[in-house]
Image: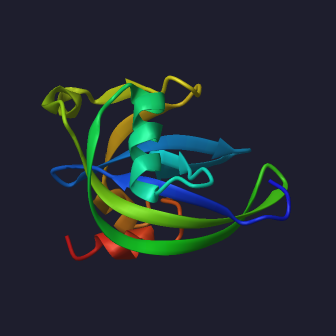
Amino acid sequence: MGSSIRPIVLGIIRRGTALLVFEGRDGDDVFYRPLGGGIEFGEHAEEALKREFREELDAEIEVGERLGVLENVFTWRGQAGHEIAFLHRAEFVDPGFYANDEMKILDDPATARWVDVHDFRDGGKILYPRGLTGLLLPE
């Protein structure tokens, strides 16, 4: 991870009360995060989000409003990390993606799945970046 701040963009895609996330692990700890990834130099966040969804799910998305920006300072696998996360509403262009309960992420061994936001609000599951659950509360 190093000593630099990494800009990322994450897509907030909903199916009813469920949020599309991938499940990650750090040792015995399980966490969830919306799909997305790094913003490359010269790339706008919206463009990066579309690129990430093509790379991760071979899916086209429409990017909506920016819900907020969160700063995330964390430790992952023993390494310090620091991210600035742009959070955008997004929707699949192909409605067939909403029918899939799970989707294999193409460039990672992880799987994307729908998780009810109440699981995060109630503390039963951990959602990153920290503060995202608060942005989802009004919905």
On the image, the x and y values in percent for residue 97 come to 23, 29
Horizontal side, residue 60 vs residue 83: left or right: left
Rendered residue at 38%/25% (across/down): 58
On the image, the x and y values in percent for residue 129 come to 53, 64
Q: Quadrant of residue 96?
A: top left
Is there any visible trace of residue 125 in the rendered image?
no
Looking at the rendered structure, the number of numbered marks drawn on it comes to 0
Picture colour scheme: rainbow
Horizontal side, residue 11 vs residue 78: left or right: left
Rendered residue at 56%/26% (across/down): 107
Rendered residue at 53%/70% (across/down): 130
Vertically, is 100 above or below 6?
above
Report the quarter where the C terminus lies.
bottom left
Rendered residue at 33%/68% (across/down): 66
On the image, the x and y values in percent for residue 26 come to 70, 47
Vertically, is 5 above or below 115?
below
